[in-house]
Amino acid sequence: MSTTISRQTLPTRRLSIIPNPSRSRQNSLSASFTGLTAGVVADASDTKSTEISIHVEGEDKAMIRPNKIMRGIVKVKTKKTIYSSQLRIKFRGVECACAKVKEAGLDSKLDRIEKITTTYFDIETIIWGTERSAYAVNSWQSIEPGEHEYKFALKFPNVNFPPSIDDPTGFSIQYIWTAYIDGPANHPGIRSQELVTPYRPLLVAPTETPWTFQETLYKDTKKTPLATVKAKLPAQVFCPDQLILVDLEINTIPSDMMIDSVAYKLRKVYEGKLLLQRGTVHRFYKRDILQTTVPVKGNKGSLHLQDIRVQFPSRLISPCFTSNHVRVYYYLIFMIQFNSGNLLKSTHHVQCEIPIGIANLSNQHLARVRDLTCIQDYKECRDAPIFFNPDLDAPPNDFGSRNRSRSNSSATNSVSYPQDEYAASLTTNEEVLFQPMSNFDNMPPIDMLSLSPPIDESLPPAYFSLSEAPQFILKERIEKTRYSNRHVKPNVSPELGEPLVLEPYLDDEW
């Protein structure tokens, strides 16, 4: 994993593109860095002269999953003729951990914002225009006024990445699409707004194994015991929209104590961790998803509730997971109210937290979902998403197997190519190499190779005589980490919450 130091981008930096030269310079395309068009600031009537946007199939309901093919279009709406060398689309997965820190023992009146950004993958493809060249300046073409649509398709690898999340405060995991229209001859271009698509891994619950949870409940001082609790659950891991029956048994220890009420709730816990050189910053956030009261009849300190119905919701719950900076887990909490004393009654409220797991697929899906048992973990696999020709139904059939064998090999720069059987389905712009990698050992030195076509036209072209770079080259996923920090005055960036204390130890628990 490579580490780089990020630089703050000045707000005055802008993206621009070359308009029709017949227009005046005052009417050139313009917009801010985060806007839909580009360039040097112009009058307000011109800021919407060119718009570029990304649309994924399914729109708001679209969701990314392992081994899934995503399709969409890039829409370009322009009122002018613009010149561009290429239209490209970028897709990346980013985890961000950011916190406002106040170090203990310091008299400084300034807070410090610490931020670590991990990019799991950052891939792009050209959906219109010419490929970039290292030895020549790009040519360009014109995009006429009107609305234009350009299709794209992407195959997500059969790998489980962390799911999309925006909690706790300052921590997030996002999967982002961005489209770019590059200007001619390295001139600035136009960038679309970012489109964030949610991602959910495929995690299967293990075989249902009934188990029993036991605990002794104490008063607030944790010295005086109140009762013993025994809960029997039908499984350890559950799925959304699942109904389970829980058997609960409560026995009070003091003889004059009774059980007044029982209720339960499902709690989701977000734990964020920012590991710095000088220590660790932790942030916790708890969300109670559902809460229900259980009817309780008269008792003398002993209560046995059978078949308590617990209905897990279908929304607001995602699988348990652990990423670089975030950990999510669940509790099934029973809230019990005790009453003690005859003349002078006292009430005690105690909670019993039962750890449970959440998956998004039941164990029966092991045989129903294709290639489910072949899913790999992103920490052990270097497979990356790949763009392919949107006119095809899918990438070449050997993409998955070749990608897996490549990621599991010790070579870090190996390259794979499609087999000859797929050559017929590729267009001219998708020309690929069919020469085995083993043949490169027998090739002459680079300075002895000719860049012109071979004399014998019956022979296949050599690598250095191809006019275009191959498209279906599988590259390894490269993670990048950026770190930044800056001092700010108090009450700056309120969206990050109150300043946290830097704990002077390195927490490497996960």
Image (spheres, rainbow, N blue to C red):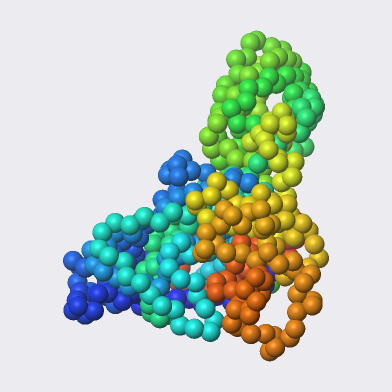
| Left/right of residue 331 with respect to residue 290 in the rendered view | right
Figure check: 456 above or below 166? below
Residue 143 drawn at (x, y percent): 31, 66
Figure check: 392 above or below 206? below
The residue under the point 40% across, 56% down is: 150
Residue 263 falls in which quadrant of the image?
A: top right
The extreme top residue here reads: 298
The extreme bottom residue here reads: 447
| Position of the C terminus by quadrant | bottom right
Residue 179 drawn at (x, y percent): 43, 62
For residue 13, say whether it is visible.
no
Q: Considering depth in this image, is 396 or 341 the residue closer to the camera?
A: 396
The residue under the point 24% across, 67% down is: 80
The residue under the point 71% across, 41% down is: 371
Q: Considering depth in this image, is 109 or 272 the residue closer to the camera?
A: 272
Residue 180 drawn at (x, y percent): 42, 66
| Position of the N terminus by quadrant | bottom right
